[in-house]
Amino acid sequence: MMTILQQATLQRQDESAELNLQQLYEQGLQQIQRWSKQIWTDYNVHDPGMTTLEILCYALTDLSYRASMPITDLLASPTDNAANMAEQFFSARQILTNRPLTELDYRKLLIDLPGIKNAWILPLSSHCYVDLPHAQLLADDPGSAGVERVNIQGRYQVRLDFNEDLTVTEQQDATQLAQDTLHANRSLCEDFVTFSAVETEPYRLCGNIELQKDASVNEVKARILFAVQNYLAPVVHNYRLSEVLAKTKADGRHYRSDDIFNGPSLTCGFILDDELRQAELRSEIRLSDLINILMDIPGILAVTELIITPVTAMVAVEDRWRQTIPAGKKAVLDQAGSRLIFHKGVMPIVPQPDQVEAELTTLQQQQRLKLDTASNEDLPIPLGHFRNPGQYTSLQHDFPSIYGLGDTGVPPGLDPNHPAKVLQLRAYLLFMEQILANYFAQLAHIRELFCTDPTQLRSYFYQTVNSFTDWQKIYADADPVASLENQIEDKVNLVDRRSRFLDHLIARFAEQFTDLAHIMYSSFEVGPETLIQYKCEFLKQYPSLSRDRSLAYNYHLQDDEALWNSDNISGLERRLTALLGIRNSRRRNLSEISYDIYAEIDTTPDDEFRFRIRHRLSNAILLSSSTHYSTTEEATAAMTTAIFHASNPNGYSRKLSSNQKHYFNIVNDNGEVVARRIEYFDQPEMMESAIAELIDYLRLNYSDEGLYLIENILLWPEQPDDPFLPVCVDRQCDSCEEHDPYSYRIHIILPAYAARFSNQDFRHFAESVIRAEVPAHIMPKICWISQADMASLESVYRAWISVKSGRTSADRQTILQSLIERLYNIKNVYPTEQLYDCSDPATDSRFILNNTALGSLSTASDSESPDQ
């Protein structure tokens, strides 16, 4: 008996206190005793206070039970649950896959294409020579003193193994598809230069094979030819999701979701890394392996003699048990030249060639069907069950009927003033019930707390307690919901909590926006509302920002939308713009943005200036200034501020006119109007559509922030007259790696004159983000250049992109030479300062070396050398 009691006690101690009614009751009683021991001494169960405590504890256990429900149930919705969960979460295929990065990744991507059995990525021998005395690169070795060979890394050749039944035209189509696929998935600072079919080395197989009495000689021979060819050139198998989940690794562990979806997203199932490593080009043939393979084929009784020899061998092989395959070649079986003799006992059996061919074709088609069948499977998102956690029923129904709180009302025969006392008790209980009801409401809106909608600015949720009798008599306000809405949370607390919820989601991806928030607030007084927009956009785009971070731009595309004013940029550029809060990541003009400032002649002698933003096509005025300015500089600064806030959905103040028309203004984080839209809308939907169109238009056409990322490897001279990049031959230089300016080097060009980039603190922050995000094997050169240098660079850079794509071929050498000259002659510029008398206490400006410059920002004399 003692043991049973001890076990029961241990179990009770292990229970969560919030789910244990007795423990909650005891804790509540102890608290009441500490608070009211001077005036309350009767703590027996018949006391109304103890009854109230017991019912409140019961309600808390209900709240605790709902809070401990599975998170999938709490996030479930009553309708369209699957669609809502898919909107709330990223699937395994979305968030776990990545662009190809390793050799195995690229091979998977190629094998996944139709018509390609296997593929190999090999380094391409690329080199040049550095002439140290003259500090230049040369294509050939002149044989003079001081010349060294420079091996270039990052250029590759691709070898493809096609299906046997492909025609020459089909092989060409498969090669083009492989080329397009690789360039669409090219990693930063790497290039795929040549594509070719793998060379083959044919072998003949000869032998004597004894069959079982019931074996089909045609089927056996077809299986032999099929199995031997798969041994000579191993086939890479693909699997369905259920097959991978059922398989185990070499150590006996099952494949986890991060193992299965590690690598590029394939369309024909999943390829396992261990099996892909074994499918390399075979370097030797072991006769013992072939004998074992044949003995596993059903119908074969014995292999009495077997030999395999290369077709090209002019003399007998020295070691018949071990054949060496020439490096870089694929061994293939010469089926026509092979000679296999079959016996059943002493009786020779001759197979029929047409039937053997039919059986072999069937085996090959079955294998190819599985390899080429689309299977874009994904792990399902757990849906959960909607449990309506926000439903709240007043605890007044749980009181004994003598209290008069239930639906039956006040018992008859009591004091006439008793109904008033019941109302007082209802009002007293409402203080506690409202807190409970709000907690239930908070549970019901967990999806909203963690959503990525920037317009969702609520962090506390509530509900009216109206499930008891005469609830209208308790509330003084006719609309208790509206009354609660005005009292639950203020704007400052709301925005701060909403931002912290988003920070939690971002931290789950091991990311953070803390540094950006600090620099934006300290240097630009940008409040958390604007940062909420940054964070929501970052979370929505995170699968691509994470998956594509190593992706380079596709220089093979030739359409206009892929060359300029284009989203065809590297994944690193897209990620950097998101982390730096740059609204427009497209490749576009950065040197000049056309601001439309017009002069307004006032009755006073002085001119006054306003700004307006017109649509470039329709010429409609999209925004106008809310006041006038004394100079064009002030108007331009005000327009820049207005565009900054108008590009953010939180920068809009929606209004309703006296005649019930809808309109909106642009406001800053303090709620001050910085621009107006002189247009009225009949319906709020029409106004919201106009706001969305305005945001897209401003982000596309009026952003002075951006960057260019130029890969040095793409400037490699591919034609005899192409120029080389400059080379650094200074042995004491810490910024240059040997004499190779091409391998894993990039230039990152940013406009020093842009609104935030002219701030030195933000520039330091941007550089730290860039260096942290650039892959460790890549060396970046960061340049902050003037508007004049940007205009000069972007014109020739735009021309080079067209040349590199193959769309134009004229003046290739001239354009490349111009790009190299401008790229290596641009200078870093810094914010300007003046020298002051150090003894003047009123002067707090300081000239800091490598941080500021004397004179105008736009002059070359005020520039320093680029940051290495």
Image (cartoon, helix red, strand yellow):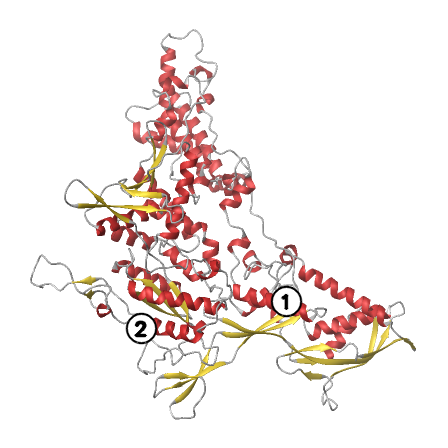
Residue holding disc 2: 825
Secondary-structure class at tag 2:
helix
- Nearer to us in this view, 659 or 11: 659
Q: Which residue is drawn at the image coordinates 38% and 46% (left, top)?
A: 695
Quarter of the image for residue 439 reads top left
Query: Badge 1 local density, few (<14 within 10 Å), some, or many (20+)?
Result: few
State left or right for residue 167 relative to residue 429: right
Q: Quadrant of the N terminus?
A: top right
- Residue 784 visible? The answer is yes
Residue holding disc 1: 173
Q: Amino acid at mark 1?
A: Asp
Quarter of the image for residue 606 reads top left
Q: Is residue 207 above or below residue 57?
A: below
Q: Amino acid at mark 2?
A: Asn
Query: Badge 2 local density, few (<14 within 10 Å), some, or many (20+)?
Result: few
Q: Which mark is residue 637?
A: none
Q: Residue furthest bottom?
A: 144
- Nearer to us in this view, 404 or 274: 274
Q: Which residue is drawn at the image coordinates 30% and 81% (left, top)?
A: 732
State left or right for residue 694 relative to residue 302: left
Quarter of the image for residue 862 reads bottom left
Position of residue 785 measured from the top left corner of the image (x, y, whole percent)? 30, 65
Q: Is residue 330 above or below residue 449?
A: below
Position of residue 88 measured from the top left corner of the image (x, y, whole percent)? 49, 45
